[in-house]
Amino acid sequence: MRAATTTRRRDIQLAYLLLAPTLLLLLTVLAYPVGWEVWTSLTDLSPLKDGPPAFVGLANYRAFLADPEFWRAAAVTVVYAAVTSVAKLALGTGFALLLARPFRGRALVFLAVFLPWAYPASVSVIGWYWTLSPPIPTAYSVLMGNIKYAVDSAFGGGAWAFVSVTLFNIWRGSSFIGVFLLAGINAIPPQLFECAVLESKSPWRRFWLVTVPLLKPFFALAVFLSLAMAFADLANVWMLTGGRIVFPVIGTHAYWLAIRGGQFGAASALSLMLVPFFLVVLLVCFRIFDPPEGTGA
Amino acid sequence: MAQVMMKNLNKKYDEVHAVKDVNLHIRDKEFMVLVGPSGCGKSTTLRMVAGLEEITAGEIMIGDRVVNDLPPKDRDIAMVFQNYALYPHMTVYDNMAFGLKMRKFPKLEIQKRVQEAAEILGIQELLRRKPRQLSGGQRQRVAVGRAIVRHPQVFLFDEPLSNLDAKLRVQMRVELKRLHERLETTAIYVTHDQVEAMTLGDRVVVMKDGWIQQVGEPLELYGKPANKFVAGFIGSPAMNFLDVKVADANGALWAEAHGLRVKVPPAHTSRLMPYKGQQVTLGVRPEDLQLASGSDPSEYVFDAVVDVVEPLGSEILLDLRAANSTIVARVEPTVRVKVHEKTRLAMTPDRAHFFDVNTELAI
């Protein structure tokens, strides 16, 4: 009896020992920065200020809630995330379905679809930048200039920038979503699709009644990844607009505040503002991904 | 209810000729089994009937319609897949109702048919469960149920029992046979397991490398295999093959090999005449070999050395060395022999088979 207890205790000790590296890693790279950011958001920490940071409670958050600029940035961010996610999902699904069945030259098409994702962002951004606002005056640059003017005057300043960043995100992201969903389709036994072919002629019906439900977990993950990338997006917006805040998203605002403005406290609060909303979306995604037992039966 | 006809059916992929000139007439209400090793073209043939593979050349008729260009949905077939192909997101009821829903059957009719099929298969209790909550055997039943509710003209089975464990497979085999007797629907059944083929089929088609080797009733294939491949494929343990020379002595033909000399049974004499002085393959099934007793006619007896003894309870399998080959004999469980023991085997003369060495066809 005593021997058994000793063995068990040793097992438990070993388990903690084996878990320790992972735990340490999570604490240092995840828990610590997040905790630090949350704490910072409750202070007026700034390198421009002398002396230790003062605890200000929820003042930073309250300031943003009262600031129309914040609400505008939040709205743009949400719309940006939603529009790009829907478009990427639709295009990505198309790519995946196209690439799922064998045909001549599939490898080439696969390469073409995947290229936007594999290409360094900084390089492709320049390509897009020059495509949308050509550096050399030609008939084309005049045309693009006119389009930019038309869009901006119809929807307000920054609309064209929003369109271009959105297009870039979709262009780059749908290839990723496509390859991701292709992996999903390939993980499903082909008989499940064949069985549907035996029962219905309409590819449309088969898509909605069989493909979509079978891919649901993959869709949920894809949506999650896409939303996460859009919500946290700073790089794409920054690179395409050259750092000008022509249209504000949370990411660029926070960057301006922290790095250019030196207001670490406020910037931390700003980047955390959308987290609760994002967590709800995440929760919904995982409910779809892994529905609790007994529902729908 | 319908017959199925295949005329000069061919399937070519880029580099592989998977099905070659298959001609087959499956009668109404018949249970036809396609059997052969993997890659023999049996599944491809079935999938062409289903419409899941395009037909390269030839014709398939179901009933009196040529179905080559009909979409699968309009062929009036129902298929059961090896991995069951149940939809994980649907309940058992919805899985069984799937085909009918896709065809927009009225709800009441769907309900009636699913209930009926569930009763036949004894799965009424499971209708509200999801596939992942079922055992392998139960999933198999659901997959069969999904086919039954469609009331098709032809059932297509693609290795439906291969994912089950041995015991369950035997049980489901019996159930499928009973089911076929009850429903009286034409069925085409693909398997690589010759025991399944023999026990289930009204007739069996043996295939190899895309060719049909032989079509016949199970006992016909067993008793009169058309060639060496069928002879070796049907029956377990497999038939023994010995290379022998046909010799003429004392007014009779003899099959000779190193340390072996047996008389050619009278039934084969005339057919083996042209092979006098030539090599042929002698085929003897393990069950047609017994340890020789004094009463066995000596011209059908030869020497052998015991290599391995496998007592199975109801019988004993002996691996022996004879005529420079390894042969298997299936003997009575009461037989007592030891490894390395020299013994004498007697073969049942009228059960011997002879094959041409070059064409491998039965002589």
Image (spheres, coloured by chain):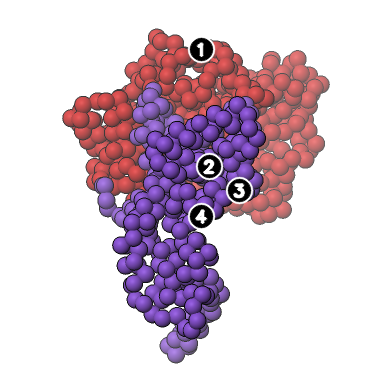
Give the residue displayed 36% in from the left and 52% down from the top. Answer: A72
Position of A223 with respect to A14 (left or right) is left
**Which secondary structure, mark 2?**
helix
Chain of the residue where label 3 is placed in the rendered structure: A
Select label 3 or label 4 by which is in front: 4
Q: Disc 3 and disc 4: Cα gap in Å?
A: 12 Å
| Labels 4 and 2: the sequence-earlier one | 2
Q: Are marks 1 and 2 in contact (CB under 8 Å)?
A: no
Please name the color used to draw chain B: red
Q: Are marks 1 and 3 in contact (CB under 8 Å)?
A: no
| Labels 2 and 3: the sequence-earlier one | 3
Badge 4 is on which residue?
A234
**Which secondary structure, mark 1?**
strand
Chain of the residue where label 1 is placed in the rendered structure: B
Position of A126 with respect to A70 (left or right) is right
* Residue A16 % position (x, y): 50, 79
Q: Which mark is residue B59?
A: 1
Residue kind at label 2, given as amino acid type: Phe
Same chain assignment for discs 3 and 4 = yes
Position of B63 with respect to A96 (left or right) is left
**Which secondary structure, mark 3?**
helix
Badge 2 is on which residue?
A168
- Between B2 and B197, the residue placed more toward the observer is B2
Q: Disc 4 and disc 1: Cα gap in Å?
A: 62 Å
